[in-house]
Amino acid sequence: MPYKHELLHRFGVFNKLVPKMLGQTQSIRSHWGLVAVGNARGQLGGWPRSVVTCTNGQKPDKTTGCPDGKLRFPSGKGSPGSSNDLNPVSEFELLMAGLINPDQVSGDLIVCDTQTSDIPLGGEVIEDENGQKYIVGDCKSGIKFVTPEELEANWQLYDSENVRLKPRGKSDPNLRVVNLVVYKSDADVVEALSDGAKGESALRDAKQWLDTYLNTVRKSWANDTTVDGKQLSSLTFPVAECDRNGKPNCTVIQCAVVCANGGQNIGSVAGGNCGCACPNGFEGATCESTKQTVAEPTSGATTASVPALTAPTTTTIANTQVTNTQVANTQVANTQAVDETAQTTAQPATAGDAPVENDSGVPLTQTSLGCPRYTPTLTLVTIAYLFL
């Protein structure tokens, strides 16, 4: 599922210094494309800086680029426009959202600009003698090193100051997000919200899967936006009757939790998730305890357990009572982006634009190298809006 991918489309990628095309034919607009995006791959594509090299295996030079004007991007380590919640949020995406400052980014964005390349899609797939596959980008328009400060000065996001999150923008980084689930009948609503064993009702199973999935998104967003031990942003999904049109506005009640040892107060009373984001070295509900140091394992890789991100095949569409993942007739705000060539507004990216890849990073067809449109294979549909 591409939940964080779509959430980050609220902020970009809309920047004058990031190419909008792969070659002369394939649009990659609002995704990174063939770019090294810092210390980790991103939600909107890109590769870690550490894995991107010239075709001779050397690192690109900031002044001279690469001898043949090409950059090599390994499969499985990144993508021109990835769509996978298990991917991290890159440091340049944190900057894009407004959560960190340019001086907190570890280095430059490295751009392979293929917009004048004669090669279809601006590159080709090669395989070395060890069986490792790469996208070799024909950077005919240049290998460009873009500093965080330069990127910051060239955003093309409509109403950027109000859309971006604090501290670079004005929006509250503790985001309230409502997920609209629309059912075709009242009977389906009752069934989806009913109790019972797994496997007895596809609608109920889908609803329970969605609640579990959203919880993994909330947790991974918290992890992705934690920098130097401080959580910079949070997601809150529950909604209340006062959020509905025609109802009195919700009274904002501040969390009363007092965080110790420099911890940051996060969450909300409305969301039922008041708590503390603890700095390095501290833990506990209010950061009251000193964290015990645990020795790193000496061998073997450890992978965090994450619920499978596959949904039951279910028709879930609806207008119903309010739950953690449902709200009807809710006041919401639209987000817009400005096209780089004309100051006209366009609707933001939606679930329909997310590129689908096998996360190998290898373009096996013309559409997979670029940014194909997302073709849903599930009938579970979730539309998320941000409360402003």
Image (cartoon, rainbow, N blue to C red):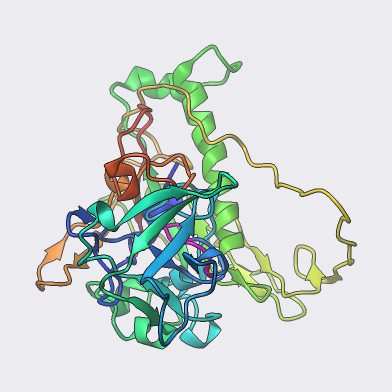
Relative to 40, does residue 134 appear above or below in the rendering?
A: above
Does residue 349 appear to the left or right of 362 in the view shown? left
174 or 123: nearer the eye?
A: 123
| Residue 31, image quadrant | bottom left
| Residue 200, image quadrant | top right
Residue 114 placed where, x, y %? Answer: 27, 65
160 or 117: nearer the eye?
A: 117
Relative to 228, does residue 268 appear above or below in the rendering?
A: above
Does the rendering let one see residue 165? Answer: no
**Residue at point 58% right, 34% down?**
308
Residue 122 placed where, x, y %? Answer: 28, 58
60 or 35: nearer the eye?
A: 60
Q: Main secondary structure of the magenta part?
A: loop
**Residue at point 20% right, 67% down?**
116
Query: Does the magenta run of residues contain 47?
Result: yes
Does residue 373 appear to the left or right of 266 in the view shown? left
Q: How many marks?
A: 0
Does residue 67 appear to the left or right of 142 in the view shown? right
Q: Quadrant of the C terminus?
A: bottom left
Query: Does the magenta run of residues contain 84?
Result: no
Does the rendering let one see residue 135? Answer: yes
Relative to 297, does residue 209 appear above or below in the rendering?
A: above
Residue 208 placed where, x, y %? Answer: 53, 30
| Residue numbers of the magenta segment | 42-49
Residue 370 placed where, x, y %? Answer: 30, 50
